[in-house]
Image (cartoon, rainbow, N blue to C red):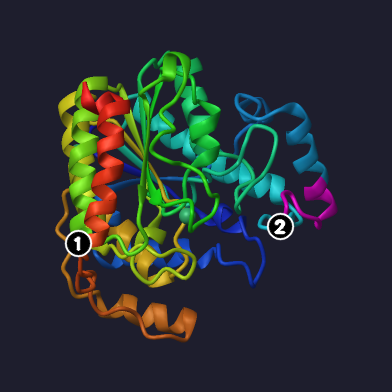
Amino acid sequence: MSGGTAMVIGTNLLTYDLGPTHPLRPERLKISWAMMDSYGLKSRLEVLQPRMATSDELLLFHSRNYVEKVREYSRRGYGLLDSGDTPAFKGCYEATSWVAGSSLFAAEAIMEGCVHHAFNLSGGLHHAYPDRAAGFCIFNDPALCICMLKMRYGCTRIAYIDVDAHHGDGVMYSFYSDPSVLNIDFHENGRYLYPGSGFPHETGKGEGEGLKINISLPPGTSDQLYIHAFERVVPPAIENYRPEIILLQSGADSHIGDPLAHLSITARTYSYIAASIHRLAHKYCGGRILVFGGGGYNLGNVARCWTTVLGILTESPIEDSTPPDWREYYKNLTGEDAPEKINEPPAETPEKLKVELDEVLKILEEGTCIGK
Ligand SMILES: [Zn+2]
Ligand SMILES: [Zn+2]
């Protein structure tokens, strides 16, 4: 196999389950995968079975003490791994090792030349730090991939783009002075949303100065505003940096109506983001794109955003009307009516938000590599 797109997926990934009342539900993967199947995308993919990260791989990023702590809590099956958002559960060590291993496997499939693009829906646990869990994330699979790309494949220019509504703090601050990571993070302004970080004046330090780009978006940011910001930041940054691979954390909680966040974009923006990154990757880095699912807490939104992204990567058209068999599956699983269209009507763009966002872009053009 060459060219093409791989999906790492299997039932082991459903074991990352923080409990029946927790918003990060394993149904997110089921409903998304079912939608991808209904649109006929499965036949356009190399489907790879998950693998577990080894403890040596976890130690590429995490501290030995922390890995041991997760192992112990996992055996015990209760307790909190952070200050409240990330409960331990029986087998959590194995569950999060499946997620991390699958992201590593996706990275390997790309770097070994088997495929151009690879996707792990269950990945994108971007809040975890080397020595602690945070924000539903036990092991940080994007950070582990970055470490592996550097150490095993000798990569020196990795672009990490994060469009989850929450700031990807665990990735951003762990490579803050590292020039081998260009980190571009779009997120809702930290004054309003967890984890409360990622402001535009945070541009990296030392050799990493100018390579950390935090686009803090006002609540209510629409498709039009988001795309305006994306266009001003991402193409110039990628053109200047010339990465060897692009990593995309495609959290679906930036979609309008997410219960945990307050941005107002639709699947149109996810389509735009994926198309832009797809074009840039084929132009500058041999098409190498590694995608992680990330957050997203409205099941219909998650499926629509991720399917849209996969449609772009596999160059498959996605009809706006959602497939009837998928709507039925959705209803059976959730008891609720499924969305009938991929694209919600676009939100309006108040002038006030545009002024606020242009202030942010001005700071970024002065302080980061997009201005050079
Ligand atoms: Zn999020
Ligand atoms: Zn392609």
Placement of the C terminus among the 4 image quadrants? top left
Q: Residue 253 occupies which quadrant of the picture? A: bottom left
Q: CA distance from mark 2 to mark 1?
A: 38 Å
184 relative to 333 in the view: left or right: left
Q: Is residue 173 visible?
A: yes
The residue that disc 2 covers is 84
Q: What segment is highlighted magenta in the picture?
A: 73-83
Going 63% across and 60% down the picture, which residue do you hit? 17
351 relative to 327 in the view: left or right: left
Question: Is the magenta region chiefly helix, strand or loop?
Answer: loop
Check disc 2: other Cα within 10 Å, few if <14, some if 14-19, many if 20+: few
Which badge, 2 or 1, is on the more N-terminal residue? 2
**Residue 297's disc number:** none
The residue that disc 1 covers is 351
x and y percentages locating residue 337 in the rendered image = 37, 85
Q: Nearer the viewer, residue 360 or 41?
A: 360
Q: Is residue 111 magenta?
A: no
Q: Nearer the viewer, mark 2 or mark 1?
A: 1
Placement of the N terminus among the 4 image quadrants? top left
Some atom of ligand 1 lies within 8 Å of the CB belonging to the residue at label 2: no
Going 53% across and 46% down the picture, which residue do you hit? 125
Going 28% across and 30% down the picture, which residue do you hit? 288
x and y percentages locating residue 306 in the rendered image = 33, 57
x and y percentages locating residue 173 in the rendered image = 53, 31
Q: Residue 79 occupies which quadrant of the picture? A: bottom right
The amino acid type found where label 1 is placed reads Glu
Q: Nearer the viewer, residue 270 or 319?
A: 270
Q: Nearer the viewer, residue 151 or 66?
A: 66
The amino acid type found where label 2 is placed reads Gly
